[in-house]
Image: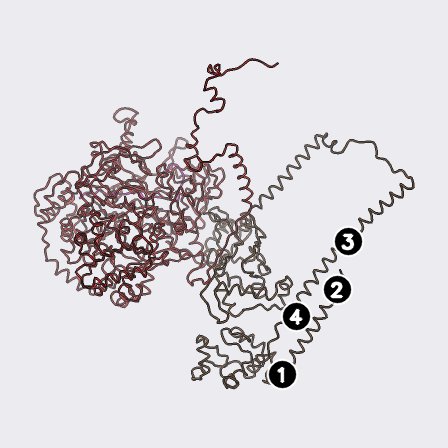
Amino acid sequence: MKKVLYRHLFSKVLGLTLLLFSTSFYAQEEAEAAQAATGGDPVKGKQLFNQNCAACHALDRKMTGPALANVEARLAEDEGLDKEWIYEWVKNSPAVISSGDAYANKIYAEYNQAAMTPFPTLSNQDIDDILAYTAAPPPAPPTAAATTATEGGDSGSGSGISNEMILGALALVFGLLVVMLVLVNKTLRRIAEANGVVLEQEKEKRLPLWKAFAQNQFLVLVSVIFLLLASAYFAYGWMMQVGVDQGYAPVQPIHFSHKIHAGDNKIDCKYCHSSARVSKTSGIPSLNVCMNCHKSIYEYVGNPEGPSAEDLAAGHTNEFYTAEIKKLYKAVGWDEENQSYTGETQPVEWVRIHNLPDFAYFNHSQHVSVAGVECQTCHGPVEEMEVVEQFSPLTMGWCINCHRETNVKVEGNAYYEAIHEELSKKYGVEELTAAMMGGLECGKCHY
Amino acid sequence: MASNKKYWKSEAELNPNDSIVEALRNNEFTEEIPVDEFLGDKDSLSASSTSRRDFLKYVGFSTAAATVAACEGPVHKSIPYVVQPDNIVPGVANYYATTIADGFDFASILVKTREGRPIKIENNKDAKVNGSANARVQASVLTLYDSKRVQGPMANGEPVEWKVLDATVKAKLNALKGSSKQVVLLTQTYASPSTSKLISDFKAAYGENVNHVVYDAISEDAALNAYNKVYGERALADYDFGKADLIVSFGADFLGDWQGGGYDSGYAKGRVPKNGKMSRHIQLESNMSLTGANADKRYPMTPTQQKIALAKLYGKLNGSSVGGGTSDVDEAVDKVAAEIKKAGSKAVVVSGINDENVQTVVLAINKLLASEAFDPEKPKYVRQGDISKVTKLVADMNAGRVGALIMDGVNPAYTLPNAEEFLAGLEKVDLSVDFAYNYDETAQASSYVAAASHYLESWGDAEFKKGQYSLMQPAIRELFDTKQFQAALLTWMGIEKTYYEYIKETWSTDVLQGGSWNKALQDGVYVVPTVEDEEVVSESEEEQPEIVPIASALRALVNSTSPGTELVLYSKVGMGDGRQANNPWLQEFPDPISRVSWDNYVTVSKADAESLGLENTIEADGGLNGSYVNLTVDGKVLENVPVIVQPGQAVGTVGLSFGYGKKAGMQKEMATGVNAYTLYGNFSDVQSVSVEKTSGVHEFACVQSQKTLMGRGDIIKETTLEIFNTKDHAEWNPMAHVSLNHQEIPVTSPDADLWDEFDRSVGHHFNLSIDLNACTGCGACVIACHAENNVPVVGKAEIRRSRDMHWLRIDRYYSSEETFEGDNDKKEEMEGLWGDKGSLGGFREMEDPSANPQVAFQPVMCQHCNHAPCETVCPVAATSHSRQGQNHMAYNRCVGTRYCANNCPYKVRRFNWFLYNNNDEFDFNMNNDLGKMVLNPDVNVRSRGVMEKCSMCIQMTQKTILDAKRDGRVIKDGEFQTACSAACSSGAMVFGDINDHDSEVAKLKEDDRMYHLLEHVGTKPNVFYHVKVRNTNEA
């Protein structure tokens, strides 16, 4: 079995190297060809494209603006427009439109009269580079998929094998040992019997241990007490966790990875959970907030080298994530083809993770805006969570503890000035905890 | 050693054939066990064959199952918006200015919405007139979520589409164009410039035969006609009682619904003694009204006597002699006339008698006095009903002269005294369309029911008073397939515009005069900048010489004769004209005077009750019972009307309130009382009646059984203006003393205290001030508290058992002697147990209120004691004090021992005997999804078995603090509010932080009039009262 595994692995690695080599070779060749045709550098062009154009344009599909693959050739062939026109358009499209240019106005009308942002800072060479990039044919998707797949499979199985193997080997060794011992014992006995050695007979019957134990009343009493105490301890522990759902990580209707959003892409928590600043609820973002970005981010392209290695390792493929984005489109009613909303919406029923009981009042803005508490203090390292789970116990003891230990942020807040002054005099301390401000009173949270 | 002895239990056992022995052997209990009695009369229960053992097995199993199941939390779903509206942040309330103008209540208000749901009504402080929400307006937000609403248009009882309805109406209207038959719009009063314009447009579109008839269920026709005669416009003169030093009211319940209401804030302004002065209020009336209860001097008089007195008063003031009439009112008239003469232009006279002569004379008197409080130049438009037109309409309908009848905001089949005639006529109308809110009497009889929108779903505008405009904007989209009348009119006229656009146009051409529409919409009110002041003055000067011919009016008044027992119909603070009768908050709202909820009743004076053999008794369970009577007016009999013996009721009169007895389109529980409209012949609120006792007793749901204070002057401290001005406050507001080591020391002294004082000097320390002078007892705060704090409705049966849940109650006390002072003196003078001054007989006498008592109101909620007796007895520390002065109640900690309620000297704690939400036994708003939309998401809905009470709206104070913290600013005075203080339009309740020494409440606390309720108990409450001062200075 091990051999099979290794062979499999070997073939994969071999295939991978071959593939990598071949794709890079082809890509290089094509890029060179493109450069030769347009006089631009597609590598630089890609960088510029991602910086300036990708928000509205893609190579192979319509977005806010038209698809740009081979745009230069297309314009030249279909519309008879030269590079100069493109320079002009990119640098100041409104001017071209107002000049009455037929094609400019056609495009303008076609894309909902949304004028393209002028890019006066781009030089002709920059534009050439971008055009070179657009002229380079997009990498063949199956190749890319194969690359990532093999890559993913490779790294994934690599770590898996080592662990499994070690464990399996150990188990096997132990098993063999046991079998051997039994066999040895058996053989020895047989030899002894054969040799007529009389094995030591059992000693005269002594009082069995349990009977001796049962007769010793003191011991019985002590152990009963011990048992009762122990069970009480465990029962208490068990009951105290009733209703405490720490670690609760339900499956959500859309696999939303906080790791990708807040971790890899470093989106601020409050960008999406904006009401945490002003309201008692942090608010699950409405779908229009998602669409701020996902209008242009229509697929997931994991970089196996970069931060997404881990996700891919966990078996979440690019296709998987892209399918989740499509779920969002379905819910919000976004028609990708026509880049428009259909109006057929289907609100997402998220499973609520943090369920504070109704009789406890908690206000996010108090903690987030006033106290400046980091979201992670209570919610844990959400930016590392692929699936969000309840990090804190959310018990009253946990709340109270924090109120006892945390100093109130009073600096620069006119509300606290007078209160702080008087209270620090009263308690003789400079720093005030929430408890000193009355943060432990029942009615502050229960009404 | 077996014994052969046989033991026998009775002789019968010796006879082996005895049937009893056999029965006993088979059956432990020979008699049938009355299981139904203790297990309730449930069909399913009686049908089941579960044995006791099985039952115990089930109990055991289900308990275990429930325990196991409880370990697993339920899965909650959170569903965010797909596209979140810009101005909605979940968890943050939005406020919109709008207007209620439902034909009976007119007010500029603010609506609090949460996630798009209106949940509370607040006063609009920007409004100069009618800016305060009364109890009914406060409750109107729940009417929006009425489960008995008409949810879509109907034709002959079947649902129909608007398209069909519109097409039918249009076709009919076109067919009637130019025909001899009328098209009648029978509507409520709108007081709306846009609607008026719209209706005239409608007339222009559909020809001359279109008539608009305005109908008020409770008519102010006489006042409108009188004003029309004198000033040439059908409107109502406005009064500002704040400017008057002397208010004389002949049966005008101006703190209630007189002429559209809205007068309480002005009145209260003059009632608080300032610089030794306050207004004096004389009330001459027959029923004990809210206004009469607040009067300094009250003369019980029959309406006939009032008329005579008014005529004579005019004579006295005019210097002419008005002869005739009975002389039993002369004494009162002399006194009143003397006072008015002294006050001169600072006096004002009003009357609520719906008689054109009376209203003409009232206008003449105020004109004669040149009363400063009287404002005829800028009249009010909140009542416009025209009786003659309504009467003619009914006649026309019966004569077949009406082709189409379109109704909005009216329910004539219920409110018309001649409802049968109306219904008969309705059958002869070719097309009847009723814009109905509930499937009420009129809707059921109409061929088409157009489902009407609530005012919180509608656009609109109103001109309450000349030049004072108010805008209505929707706070929520139509919950159901409803339409407002105006929008339907536009559709029928073939105009593509929305009513919003129509209003905007009307405003830009007719109203705004250059003002900003957006600002007007945001403020909710718009006052036309006063221009051409000079012209107005000159006009009025021109008018003045024109002497109103009132001689005939005076003659008619002075010669009025009493028609025997007089029935005086009135409207209750809680129910009004009955259009919100399906509102459980209003049904449960105790009447400020009688303290009875869930009923109307006939009020009878004690003398009349004795002669008729009518009585009220308190039963052993604490419930109030009353006799039944039949009332006969003009041959019409109203059967089995329950009786309340009302102190202060004028002998020879009985009172009955409108608004009850509605049956159609109502939930069963809410169909209470009797319909007084059937006795409203000729739209006169005074009727000649014969009262006849019938058998049976009525069970009332009355929340207060004790009527008098029994001389306990320290509960409601009272004094007169004279004493208040001349003597030291120690005399009229003495501090309670206790004995310590045989030394009398003030109860506030630290030595008298069992407890160490808790330091509340840092941070906020909330106090609530209640001025008994300004409090009129209107009860807006009670409903506001209901809405803010998710207070459950418990129903009539529970209220009768004294299980009402109101966190805030308004106690009403009568004096047993003429005055409360007299009670105190009587108690002081008691000696021994027996004899004339004996306490046994004396206290018995003091239980009965006087025939014309003084009345005092006292709002009581949790007093938030610094040394709270409830806290010390709680075994689980569920209730505790805070450094902010609030007494906290942690519901989830409470185990329901009710020790706290027993130990509370103020009796303000309320116990949840049952689960009041999601419980079919309490089928009120908390038992259906629609009604639950009104719940405040920031306040717990309490469960069964826990104690609850006023929290001093801690959710509101915490919100204010948080807002300030977030903005990083100091909190200004006036920002802190409770639901009751925010709802109080008379300024009686002031809430704030006494650690802010410049705050109003801190100043009020230092005032000489300040006292604490039951101060001698030493509870140190954070609610304090201000001594009631009565202006007894007669001229």
Quadrant of the rendering where the N terminus of chain B is positioned: top right
Task: List x then y, in percent, for residue B998.
Answer: 37, 52
* Residue B588 visible to an observer of this rendering: no
Q: On the image, numbered disc 1 is attached to which residue?
A: A33
Q: On the image, numbered disc 2 is attached to which residue?
A: A6
| Mark 1 Cα-neighbour bin, 10 Å: few <14, some 14–19, many ≥20 | some
User: Tag 3: residue type?
Assistant: Leu
Sequence-first disc among 4 and 3: 4
Give the secondary structure at mark 4. Answer: helix
Sequence-first disc among 1 and 4: 1
* Residue located farthest toward the front when viewing the structure as drawn: B17
Q: On the image, numbered disc 4 is attached to which residue?
A: A147
> Residue B486's image quarter?
bottom left
What is the CA distance from the residue labelled 2 to the residue labelled 1?
40 Å
Note whether B640 is above or below B267 in the view shown.
Answer: above
Dot 2: chain letter:
A
Chain part drawn in magenta: B1015-1035
* Left or right position of A235 against B105: right
Dot 3: chain letter:
A
User: Tag 2: residue type?
Assistant: Tyr
* Residue B954 visible to an observer of this rendering: yes
